[in-house]
Image (cartoon, rainbow, N blue to C red):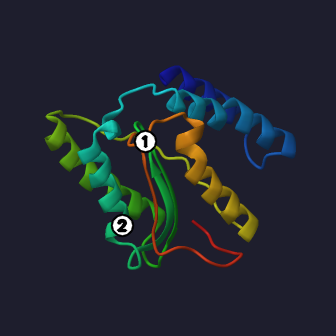
């Protein structure tokens, strides 16, 4: 993972924004797709495979649905989480992510009898700009456990209040 981050950081330094279409497709092939394959292979710690911990994360996602954000779809995988949501003002994405990560990390570490970092510092965010993109990300999240060849019970997928409209961001 550290080698992947270092390679990505070098690439980003060599390719400042704004990016051309070629840069965008090259970045997508080199970095997010490789990271997803690494995660889908079950690399790293798989603390979320524990049913109690994945239920804790699922509950955290639903907790402020409708007040701080509108939760659409999610998949809690053994070693990462996919979430499609829209922050509600004045709550921004960094505050929401901090809330989820802080609460769930503290509780999960207690449940698992472990200490230290539970989540990665960074997250990979995408702005959804159309109804087509919204449908794409919903499908991507819903199909992710089967694409990773997970068995029943190794992931938790669900929906929140849901997003509608062609210009939803989240």
Residue neighbourhood size for the residue with mark 1, other residues' Cα within 10 Å, grouped as few (<14), some (14–19), many (≥20): few
Q: In this view, does 76 lie above or below 40?
A: below
Q: In this view, does 25 lie above or below 45?
A: below
Q: Is residue 35 above or below residue 92?
A: above
Residue displayed at 38% across by 43% down? 153
According to the picture, the residue beneath numbered tag 1 turns out to be 152
- Rounded to the nearest angstrom, the CA distance separating label 1 from label 2 is 21 Å
In the rendered view, does 58 fall on the left or right side of 163?
left
- Do the residues under discs 1 and 2 have CB atoms within 8 angstroms? no
Q: Earlier in the sequence, mark 1 or mark 2?
A: 2
Q: Name the secondary structure under disc 1.
A: loop
Q: Which mark is residue 62?
A: 2
Q: Foreground residue, 65 or 13? A: 65
Image x and y of residue 43, in percent: 45, 25
In the rendered view, does 27 fall on the left or right side of 83?
right
Residue 90: tell me if it is visible: yes
Splitting the image into 4 quarters, where does residue 31 fall?
A: top right
Splitting the image into 4 quarters, where does residue 155 fall?
A: top left
State the quadrant of the C terminus.
Answer: bottom right
Q: Foreground residue, 47 or 11? A: 47
Image x and y of residue 47, in percent: 31, 35
Q: Residue furthest front?
A: 152
């Amino acid at each position: 993972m550290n080698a992947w981050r270092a390679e990505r950081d070098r690439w980003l330094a060599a390719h400042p924004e704004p990016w051309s279409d070629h840069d965008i497709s090259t970045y997508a092939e080199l970095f997010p797709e490789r990271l997803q394959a690494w995660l889908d292979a079950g690399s790293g710690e798989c603390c979320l495979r524990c049913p109690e911990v994945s239920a804790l994360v699922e509950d955290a996602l639903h907790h402020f649905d409708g007040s701080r954000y509108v939760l659409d779809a999610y998949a809690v995988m053994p070693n990462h989480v996919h979430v499609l949501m829209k922050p509600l003002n004045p709550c921004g994405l960094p505050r929401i992510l901090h809330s989820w990560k802080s609460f769930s990390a503290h509780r999960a570490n207690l449940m698992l009898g472990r200490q230290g970092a539970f989540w990665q510092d960074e997250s990979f965010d995408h702005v959804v700009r159309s109804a087509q993109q919204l449908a794409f990300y919903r499908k991507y999240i819903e199909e992710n456990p089967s694409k990773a060849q997970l068995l029943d019970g190794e992931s938790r997928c669900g929906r929140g209040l849901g997003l509608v409209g062609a210009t939803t961001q989240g």
